[in-house]
C-alpha cells in the first residue's frame, strides 16, 4: 500500500497553497512596499513545500503500518491526560496533577496499578521538592499549599 | 601563537571548580541519557536546555554542562549497544557488530572498557582537530556576505538528509515545514504580523525548545506506548574487568584511524556520526580483518567508537564557526546557543573567545572525566539501564514538561508541546525526518534576514544570490547534496543494511 504518502502529500499541498495565499494577503508594511517584503520568504517556502508535496503524491513510498484504531484511541487518551496535566498544573498544583498523569502513563506502558501509583506519587513529590527547594524553580503548589 | 594562548585561557575557565562541577554533572547525566534506550543524545540535550536556561546558569556554565552531556551521551550509547545489542542512537549501530558478540563471549566488561578508551581517543584527536581547524574556518567565513550565507543555509538543508538519506524530497518537505513555523510571529524587519491570527501567544513566534521537546521526547513516548515496549530487554551480565596494557596497545592503531576518519566525516556537511562510525568500521575491517570481525574482535569495537566520537567533535566545527549544524544533536546544541543569546558564526571567535575556548577546553576536560568515570562506574550505569521504560518514560516526560513549563510558567507552552508531540508522531509515521524541521525553525530567521539583506543591496535583483564564485560553489555543493544520495544512496544503504537487520531504527 502506498496510500499514506498520497493522502499526506495532498494535505501538505493544501497547506502549501493556503500558506502561500495567506502570505500574499499581508498588509503593506508601514513605510511602503519594498523589493523584499514580509511575504517574499514565505512565498518561496510555499513553493518549496508544494514541490515536495507533489513529489510525495506522484512517487509515494511504501507505507509504514499505522496502529489499530484502539491503539490510536489510547494514544488520544494519553494526549488528553497530558493536556489535563498541563491544565491542572495552574489550578490544583504540581503534585496533584503530576501524580495521576505519571501513574496513568506507567499503567498504560504495562506496570501494575499499585506500582504505577507508587511511581506517580514518588516521582511527583521528589521532583517538586528537588525543583522548588534545591533548584529554586517555582512550580505551582496549588491547593496543597506546601 | 594565538590559538595556544587562547586555549590556555580556555583551560583556566574549564578548570575552575565551578566548571569542573558542571562538567562532572554533565558527564554523568549524558552517559545516562545515552545509555537509556529511546533517549538519544539529541533528546537528552533538548530536555536539559530549558532546565539549564531557567536555572539561570551563565552562558559558559550552561555550555560546559551541555557539551559534557553531549560528549557523555556518545559514551553512553555504546552501553546498550554492547549489552543489549540495541544501539542507543544511530551512530552506535556499528558498535553492536563486534561489541555484542564480545559480551556474549563473557567479555562484556572488556568490550565496555575498550569502547571507553576508543571513545576517549576519538574525542581527544577530534578536539585537537577542532582547535586547529575552527579558527581557520572562522577567518575564512568572515568573507561571507548575505548571499553566501543564504547559499550556506540552503547547503545545510540539502545535505542534512546525509549521503545515506532515503527520500530527498521528504527532507525538503521537513525543512520547509520548519522554516514555515519559524515565520510565525511578528516579522522583525517590517513589524507585520505573520500567521498569528491575533493570538497573543503567537506574537513572539513558536519557541523552538518547545518544538524540540515535543517532536523528540513526546513522540518517543507515543512510540513506546504503541509498541508495548515498556518492559525493556534482557541484557548480558557484566563480568569482572581484566584489561592489560597489551590489550590497550592492541586497539590503539584502530582507534587512531577511526578517530581521524570520524573527524573528517563529522566536519563534512551531510556525513555525520553515522557515516563516521560506518566508514571507520568498514575500513578497519578491510585493513586488519583475519576472520575475527563480527565475532567479537576488540578492534571492531574500537574503530567505530573512535569514529563516532571523532565525528561528534568534528560536527562542532561547522556548528561553531558557521552557525550551521551538521547533525541532530549539534542542531540542538545550536538551539541552546541561540536561546542563551550567543550567535554562533565567525564573529563568535572574535567577540567571545573566552566562551568558545572555554567550551573547547571543557571538551578535553569532559572527555577525561568521562574516561575516568566510565571504567570504574560502568556497573552503576548498567544497573540504571535495567530500569524498565515503563517507569522511566513517564518520569522523563514529567521532567521534560517541568523544563518547558519553567521557561514561561504558562500551561499554553505545554499544550503546544503535546501538539508538537502529535505532529512528530505523524511525521515519523510518514517517514518525514524531524531534524530538518528543527533546523528550519532555528535557521529560519537568519536565512530570511540574509535573503533580505542580499536583495535589498541588489535592489531586488535575484541574480545577486549567485554573484560570487563562493556562493556559486556553495550552491553546487548543495545541489550535489540533494542529487548524489539519489544515485549513491541505494548502494550505501544496501551495505549498511546487513548489520542493521534485526535492529529497530
Image (tube, grey):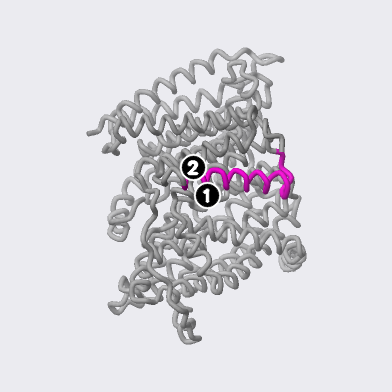
In the picture of the structure, the residue carrying the numbered disc 1 is B42
Quarter holding the N terminus of chain B?
Answer: bottom right
Query: Residue B471 at what x, y percent from top left?
Result: 55, 42
Instruction: Tell me the chain of label 2.
Output: B
Task: Identify the mark nearer the N-term, 1 or 2.
Answer: 1
**Percent x, y of residue B365:** 66, 67
Tell whether B283 sits left or right of B405: left
Q: Which of the 4 quarters of the picture holds residue B426?
A: top left
**Residue A4 visible:** yes
User: Do the residues marked 1 and 2 share a common chain?
Assistant: yes
The answer to whether B402 appears left or right of A9 in the picture is right
Q: Are marks 1 and 2 in contact (CB under 8 Å)?
A: yes
Magenta-colored span: A115-138
Along the viewing direction, whichever of A113 and A19 lies nearer the viewer: A113
Looking at the image, the residue that sits furthest to the front is A114
**In the picture shown, does residue A127 fall above or below B411?**
below
Mark carried by residue B449? none
Secondary element at image label 2: helix
Q: Please report the residue visible at 58 percent of the width from the left and 52 percent of the height from the top.
A: B318
Say which residue label 2 marks: B216
Amino acid at each position: 500500500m502506498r496510500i499514506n504518502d498520497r493522502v499526506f502529500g495532498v494535505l501538505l499541498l493544501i497547506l502549501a497553497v493556503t500558506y502561500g495565499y495567506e502570505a500574499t494577503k499581508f498588509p503593506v508594511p508601514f513605510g511602503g512596499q519594498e523589493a523584499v517584503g514580509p511575504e517574499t520568504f514565505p512565498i518561496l517556502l510555499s513553493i518549496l513545500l508544494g514541490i515536495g508535496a507533489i513529489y510525495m503524491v506522484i512517487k509515494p513510498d511504501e507505507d509504514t503500518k499505522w496502529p489499530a484504531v484502539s491503539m490510536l484511541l489510547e494514544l488520544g487518551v494519553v494526549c488528553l491526560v497530558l493536556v489535563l496535566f498541563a491544565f491542572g498544573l495552574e489550578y490544583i498544583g504540581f503534585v496533584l496533577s503530576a501524580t495521576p498523569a505519571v501513574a496513568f502513563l506507567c499503567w498504560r506502558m504495562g506496570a501494575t496499578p499499585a506500582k504505577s501509583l507508587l511511581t506517580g506519587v514518588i516521582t511527583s513529590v521528589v521532583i517538586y521538592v528537588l525543583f522548588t527547594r534545591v533548584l529554586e524553580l517555582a512550580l505551582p503548589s496549588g491547593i496543597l499549599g506546601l | 601563537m594565538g590559538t595556544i594562548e587562547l586555549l590556555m585561557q580556555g583551560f583556566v575557565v574549564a578548570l575552575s571548580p565551578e566548571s569542573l562541577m558542571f562538567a562532572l554533572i554533565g558527564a554523568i547525566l549524558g552517559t545516562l541519557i545515552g545509555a537509556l534506550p529511546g533517549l538519544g543524545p539529541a533528546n537528552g540535550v533538548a530536555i536539559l536546555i530549558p532546565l539549564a536556561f531557567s536555572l539561570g546558569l551563565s552562558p559558559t556554565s550552561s555550555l560546559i554542562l551541555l557539551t559534557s552531556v553531549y560528549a557523555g551521551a556518545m559514551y553512553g550509547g555504546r552501553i546498550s549497544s554492547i549489552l543489549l545489542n540495541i544501539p542507543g542512537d544511530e551512530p552506535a549501530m556499528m558498535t553492536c557488530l563486534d561489541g555484542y558478540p564480545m559480551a556474549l563471549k563473557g567479555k562484556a566488561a572488556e568490550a565496555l572498557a575498550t569502547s571507553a578508551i576508543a571513545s576517549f581517543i576519538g574525542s581527544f584527536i577530534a578536539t585537537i582537530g577542532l582547535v586547529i581547524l575552527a579558527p581557520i574556518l572562522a577567518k575564512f567565513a568572515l568573507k561571507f556576505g548575505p548571499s553566501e550565507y543564504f547559499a550556506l543555509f540552503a547547503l545545510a538543508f540539502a545535505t542534512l538528509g546525509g549521503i545515506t538519506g532515503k527520500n530527498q524530497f521528504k527532507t525538503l518537505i521537513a525543512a520547509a515545514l520548519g522554516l514555515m513555523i519559524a515565520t510565525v510571529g511578528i516579522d522583525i524587519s517590517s513589524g507585520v504580523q505573520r500567521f498569528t491570527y491575533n493570538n497573543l501567544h503567537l506574537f513572539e513566534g513558536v519557541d523552538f525548545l518547545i518544538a524540540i521537546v515535543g517532536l523528540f521526547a513526546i513522540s518517543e513516548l507515543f512510540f513506546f506506548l504503541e509498541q508495548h515496549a515498556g518492559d525493556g530487554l534482557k541484557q548480558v551480565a557484566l563480568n569482572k574487568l581484566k584489561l592489560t596494557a597489551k590489550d590497550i596497545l592492541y586497539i590503539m592503531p584502530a582507534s587512531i584511524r577511526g578517530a581521524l576518519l570520524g573527524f573528517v566525516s563529522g566536519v563534512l556537511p551531510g556525513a555525520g556520526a553515522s557515516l563516521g562510525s560506518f566508514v571507520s568500521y568498514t575500513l578497519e575491517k578491510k585493513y586488519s580483518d583475519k576472520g575475527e570481525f563480527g565475532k567479537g574482535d576488540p578492534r571492531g569495537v574500537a574503530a567505530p567508537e573512535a569514529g563516532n566520537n571523532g565525528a561528534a567533535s568534528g560536527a562542532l566545527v561547522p556548528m561553531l564557526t558557521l552557525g550551521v549544524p551538521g547533525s541532530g544533536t549539534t542542531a540542538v546544541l545550536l538551539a541552546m546557543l541561540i536561546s542563551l543569546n550567543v550567535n554562533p558564526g565567525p564573529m563568535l571567535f572574535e567577540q567571545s573567545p573566552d566562551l568558545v575556548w572555554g567550551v573547547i577546553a571543557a571538551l578535553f576536560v569532559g572527555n577525561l572525566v568521562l574516561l575516568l568515570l566510565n571504567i570504574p562506574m560502568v556497573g552503576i550505569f548498567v544497573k540504571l539501564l535495567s530500569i524498565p521504560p515503563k517507569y522511566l518514560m513517564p518520569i522523563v516526560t514529567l521532567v521534560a514538561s517541568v523544563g518547558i513549563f519553567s521557561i514561561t510558567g504558562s500551561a499554553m507552552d505545554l499544550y503546544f508541546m503535546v501538539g508538537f508531540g502529535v505532529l512528530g508522531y505523524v511525521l515519523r509515521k510518514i517517514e518525514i525526518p524531524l531534524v530538518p524541521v528543527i533546523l528550519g525553525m532555528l535557521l529560519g530567521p537568519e536565512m530570511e534576514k540574509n535573503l533580505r539583506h542580499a536583495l535589498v543591496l541588489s535592489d531586488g535583483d535575484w541574480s545577486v544570490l549567485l554573484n560570487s564564485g563562493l556562493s556559486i560553489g556553495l550552491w553546487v555543493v548543495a545541489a550535489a547534496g540533494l542529487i548524489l544520495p539519489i544515485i549513491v544512496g541505494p548502494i550505501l544503504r544496501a551495505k549498511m543494511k546487513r548489520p542493521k537487520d534485526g535492529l529497530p531504527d
